[in-house]
């Protein structure tokens, strides 16, 4: 349990901008892996991950699929706008972020690139909500697939390409709904998964549809004042059983990515296998499910820096980040990864 009171500034660090990866490694498993689980820090290649796993361990992946959620269009006046569809709602309408010089009033019909329209219904989830509620003139998933762009993170400076469409997606993505990739899982390719299987390591999946809020820096200095964004999650019955089996054989539950951690710990805290989670994991949090974590390097002052510090220990994480910067690791979504054990 953490006795120290942390502020947002504690999770800040200076990152040379050239270490922000703009493109993926030539091969998915060709990235680097910083092993922070022992006394000494060890620089490894990601393809050597199986040597850190043990027979009986359970790897839990997030099988969400990134949708081409970025759409361009214009107001009736001709003013340009950009939509980022955060989620498709049960009735087929959408909740979206909107970039536009002057917000249009409800009832406005927007002309979208690709020849379809989007009617602005109001705000979401309520009249003061942070997102815009819109109804598209066709099936939202079909329109995004046909006319949308890969929603690359704000720190990736190029427009989306065919490479991004292939590589900003995991090889096992199957449930569409994310506007950001579960980036730790981008390092896995079929050959690596096959080797993991041969070592007697089990695999299971959860779904958390990653929202754009994952990139938002924490703006309050007091952690308790931060309002966490909410994301949809699902833990299927076969994964619940796989975790029970793993515990029974004294294996480790290894979360692939912070989204898997948030899903598993939300389920453990609520008892609900599906729902919306706004779980905010900070130092002092008591983990109930996850023993080890594979994760990329995160943004300064972000909720994910707080999560990994809660998991592996604040001093440990800051030492790992200092080492990674000194050794020129690549950072963020297309960057390298860390292997962490629970404090």
Image (cartoon, helix red, strand yellow):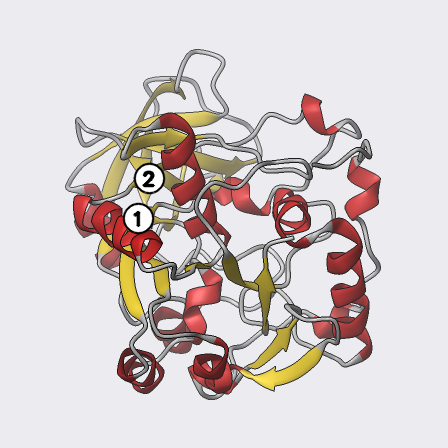
Q: Do labels 2 and 1 touch, CB within 8 Å?
A: yes
User: In this orientation, does residue 331 appear?
Assistant: yes
Mark on residue 65? none
Residue beneath the point at 82% across and 35% down: 4
Residue 222 versus residue 244 in the image, above or below: above
Left or right of 333 in this view: 174 = left
Q: Nearer the viewer, residue 13 or 137?
A: 13
Element on which disc 1 rests: strand
Kindly identify the residue that appears in the image at 54 percent across and 45 percent down.
Answer: 214
Q: Quadrant of residue 90?
A: top left
Q: Nearer the viewer, residue 220 or 242?
A: 242
* x then y, percent, for residue 225: 69, 22
Give the quarter of the image for residue 329. bottom right
Image height of 8 relative to 199, above or below: above
Counting residues from the start of the chain, the first of labels 2 and 1 encountered is: 1
Say which mark, if any, is on residue 233: 2
Mark 2 lies on a secondary structure that is strand
Q: Residue furthest top?
A: 127
Q: Which residue is painted at 83% across and 44% down in the image? A: 10
Residue 51 image position (x, y, % from top left): 47, 83
- How far apart marks 2 and 1 lie (CA) works out to 5 Å
Residue wearing tag 1: 207
Q: Nearer the viewer, residue 70 or 258?
A: 258
**In the rendered view, does 136 fall on the left or right side of 25?**
left
């Amino acid at each position: 349990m953490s006795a120290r009171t942390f502020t947002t500034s504690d999770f800040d660090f200076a990152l040379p901008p050239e270490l922000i990866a703009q493109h993926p490694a030539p091969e998915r498993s060709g990235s680097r892996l910083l092993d922070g689980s022992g006394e000494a820090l060890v620089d490894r290649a990601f393809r050597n991950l199986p040597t850190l796993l043990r027979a009986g361990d359970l790897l839990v992946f997030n099988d969400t699929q990134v949708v081409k959620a970025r759409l361009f269009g214009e107001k009736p006046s001709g003013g340009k706008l950009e939509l980022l569809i955060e989620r498709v709602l049960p009735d087929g309408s959408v909740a979206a972020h909107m970039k536009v010089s002057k917000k249009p009033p409800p009832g406005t019909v927007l002309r979208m690139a690709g020849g379809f329209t989007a009617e602005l219904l109001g705000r979401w989830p309520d009249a003061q909500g942070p997102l815009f509620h819109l109804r598209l003139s066709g099936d939202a998933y079909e329109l995004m697939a046909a006319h949308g762009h890969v929603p690359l993170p704000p720190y990736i400076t190029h427009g989306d390409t065919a490479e991004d469409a292939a590589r900003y997606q995991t090889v096992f993505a199957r449930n569409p709904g994310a506007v950001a990739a579960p980036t730790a899982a981008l390092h896995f390719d079929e050959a690596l998964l096959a080797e993991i299987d041969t070592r007697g390591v089990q695999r299971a999946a959860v779904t958390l549809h990653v929202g754009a809020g994952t990139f938002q820096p924490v703006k309050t200095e007091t952690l308790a004042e931060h309002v966490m964004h909410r994301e949809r999650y699902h833990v299927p019955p076969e994964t619940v059983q796989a975790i029970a089996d793993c515990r029974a054989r004294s294996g480790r539950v290894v979360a692939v990515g912070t989204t898997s951690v948030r899903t598993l710990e939300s389920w453990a805290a609520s008892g609900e296998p599906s729902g919306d989670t706004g779980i905010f994991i900070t130092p002092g949090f008591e983990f109930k499910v996850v023993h080890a974590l594979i994760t990329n390097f995160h943004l300064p002052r972000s909720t994910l820096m707080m999560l990994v510090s809660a998991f592996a220990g604040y001093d440990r994480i800051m030492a790992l980040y200092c080492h990674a910067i000194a050794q020129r690791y690549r950072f963020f979504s297309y960057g390298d990864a860390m292997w962490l054990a629970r404090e």
